[in-house]
Image (cartoon, helix red, strand yellow):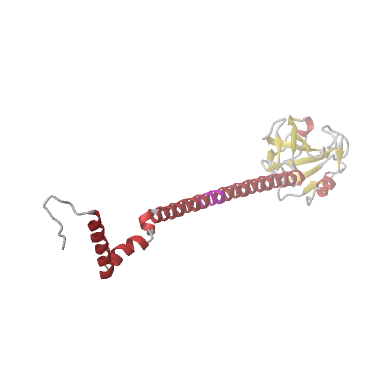
């Protein structure tokens, strides 16, 4: 006798039936390969780096590092350039200071050389002239009986020059010498210029070699225009020394 199962509209399948159907379905899917095709990737695939979000972070990190490195390089280069400029400017200042110091020293040397030349240069009191009356010549024209200086031939108004550097200690009337100038020389000796027609310096004035101090004449005890020149150890009459030897000792040809 066979049994039949009622399958009414509202009757749920039994547990055994449901399990059997589900097993059959799985078997069918396995057999057809659908399960393998659909399930295998989901079960076997590893998550890609893009899926994890790591690659963008790493890429961004490299970019920032490169940018930071470039900025660091730029800053280092800028610092090196600034240091180089500062060194170049310092070197330029140093060179300028050294050049200025050298120029100052050269100027001082030139000034010292010029001063030495000024103090050691001597010239004749009258340019292009000659001695017309010698030192110690005898004559009744002089109160001492001898000539205490030398006379240079010179027409009235001829320029008279200081023979060397010195300071004027007398400038005016000198009795028998007429108008006269007496100069204390740099070396401590004295020179005197007599019978002048005019005087162009004053007491206390410093003079240089060759500077015009007067003009020749015939004032005082003189028989005609000329320049009376004396070299002395002191400012006063009677301290005379040989003027020709004096001038020659200073390089003046007489």
Dominant secondary structure, magenta: helix
Q: Quadrant of the N terminus?
A: bottom left
Residue 168: x and y in percent read: 74, 33
Residue drawn at x 21%, y 54% is 14
Relative side of 216 to 144, left or right:
left
Relative side of 44 to 34, left or right:
right
52 or 240, which is in the foreground?
A: 52
Residue 34 visible, this angle: no
Residue 240: x and y in percent read: 86, 38
Q: Is residue 35 above or below residue 184?
A: below
Q: How many numbered tags mark residues here?
A: 0
Q: Which residues are magenta?
A: 77-84
234 or 76, which is in the foreground?
A: 76
From this viewpoint, which residue is outermost toward the left?
9
From this viewpoint, which residue is outermost toward the bottom?
32
Residue 217, image quadrant: top right
From this viewpoint, which residue is outermost toward the front?
1
Residue 8 visible, this angle: yes
Q: Is residue 146 above or below residue 172?
A: below
Residue 50: x and y in percent read: 36, 57
Residue 75: x and y in percent read: 50, 49
Residue drawn at x 15%, y 59% is 4
Relative side of 17 to 235, left or right:
left
């Amino acid at each position: 006798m066979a049994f039949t199962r009622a399958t009414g509209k509202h009757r749920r399948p039994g547990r055994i039936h449901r399990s059997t159907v589900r097993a059959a379905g799985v078997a069918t899917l396995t057999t057809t390969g659908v399960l393998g095709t659909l399930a295998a990737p989901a079960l076997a695939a590893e998550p890609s780096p893009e899926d994890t979000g790591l690659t963008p972070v790493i890429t961004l990190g490299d970019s920032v590092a490169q940018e930071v490195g470039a900025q660091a390089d730029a800053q280092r280069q800028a610092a090196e350039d600034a240091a180089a400029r500062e060194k170049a400017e310092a070197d330029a200042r140093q060179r300028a200071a050294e050049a200025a110091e050298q120029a100052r020293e050269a100027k001082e040397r030139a000034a010292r050389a010029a001063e030495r030349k000024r103090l050691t240069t001597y010239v004749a009191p009258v340019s292009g002239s000659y001695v017309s009356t010698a030192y110690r010549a005898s004559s009744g024209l002089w109160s001492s009986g001898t000539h205490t200086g030398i006379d240079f031939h010179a027409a009235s108004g001829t320029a008279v020059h200081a023979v060397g550097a010195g300071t004027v200690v007398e400038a005016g009337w000198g009795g028998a010498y007429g108008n006269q100038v007496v100069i204390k020389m740099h070396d401590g000796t004295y020179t005197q210029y007599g019978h002048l027609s005019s005087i162009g310096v004053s007491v206390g004035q410093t003079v240089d070699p060759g500077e015009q101090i007067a003009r020749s004449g015939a004032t005082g005890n003189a028989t005609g225009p000329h320049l009376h020149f004396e070299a002395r150890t002191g400012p006063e009459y009677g301290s005379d020394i040989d003027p020709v030897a004096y001038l020659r000792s200073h390089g003046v040809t007489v």
